[in-house]
Amino acid sequence: DAGVTQSPTHLIKTRGQQVTLRCSPKSGHDTVSWYQQALGQGPQFIFQYYEEEERQRGNFPDRFSGHQFPNYSSELNVNALLLGDSALYLCASSLQGVGQYFGPGTRLTVT
Amino acid sequence: GENVEQHPSTLSVQEGDSAVIKCTYSDSASNYFPWYKQELGKRPQLIIDIRSNVGEKKDQRIAVTLNKTAKHFSLHITETQPEDSAVYFCAASSVDDYKLSFGAGTTVTVRA
């Protein structure tokens, strides 16, 4: 039984570019949440997807968008990258939002 | 929104001693409180959680207590071992607010 997987592992982008990160939830889970974790800080909630719709959103600008597919996998898109977007992006899956299990994360570096 | 404060930010203990991490939350609607352990360069790992209808929960050397009136909850690790060294995060959420609000983390170092 595979846990939560994310791709890619690492990514280097230039300011102004766009990036897409991917997440496959744990088997049996139907909800995907995305978090941003800056170095030395706790994860910050970006948004959550359930039934292919954004169910809740944190305090992140519209440059951050997402999508959930019928197989429950999800993508996080960030447009017009800023230096401050450099962080570890974590995906967490759960069954209807409760008991979130994290993936290994994608380390994004914006130069 | 929910605000979770976590103390201390660093904790150094001798192997075999106990470690206690405390968190407070602001939203009285919060009713689910998980704890995560994150080793360097790895994913946060759910180690124990508690719901507001329970005051205490134990799992081997780990226990969590919850005081709803005071809006605080704590993680207790007994008989600490070197492999307990990591960053620990507390979090809170409610049934109607699916996001997890995390504390800033506690770096625990177990000295051999």
Image: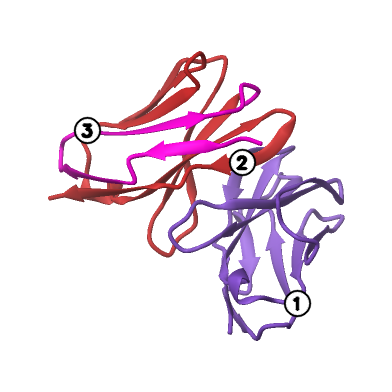
State the separation of the CA atoms marked 3 and 2.
27 Å
What's the colour of chain B in the image?
Answer: red
Find residue A13 and report its horizontal and vertical position in percent: 64, 83
Q: Which residue occupies 74% across, 64% down?
A: A76
State the separation of the CA atoms marked 1 and 2.
26 Å
Q: Which residue occupies 87% across, 49% down?
A: A53
Residue A69, image quadrant: bottom right
Q: Which residue occupies 62% across, 56% down?
A: A4
Q: Which residue is mark 1?
A: A80
Residues A66 and B24: in front is: B24
Q: Which residue is mark 3?
A: B18
Q: Which residue is mark 2?
A: B100
Q: Could you tell me the amino acid type at mark 3?
A: Ser
Q: Which residues are magenta?
A: B1-30
Q: Could you tell me the amino acid type at mark 1?
A: Ala
Residues B104 and B98: in front is: B104
- On screen, residue B29 versus residue B105, left or right, reads right
Give the number of marks. 3
Say what secondary structure mark 3 lies in.
loop
How crowded pointer 2 is (Cα within 10 Å; few <14, some 14-19, many 20+) is rated as many
Q: Do the residues marked 3 and 2 share a common chain? A: yes
Looking at the image, is A96 positioned above or below residue B69? Answer: below
Q: Are marks 3 and 1 in contact (CB under 8 Å)?
A: no
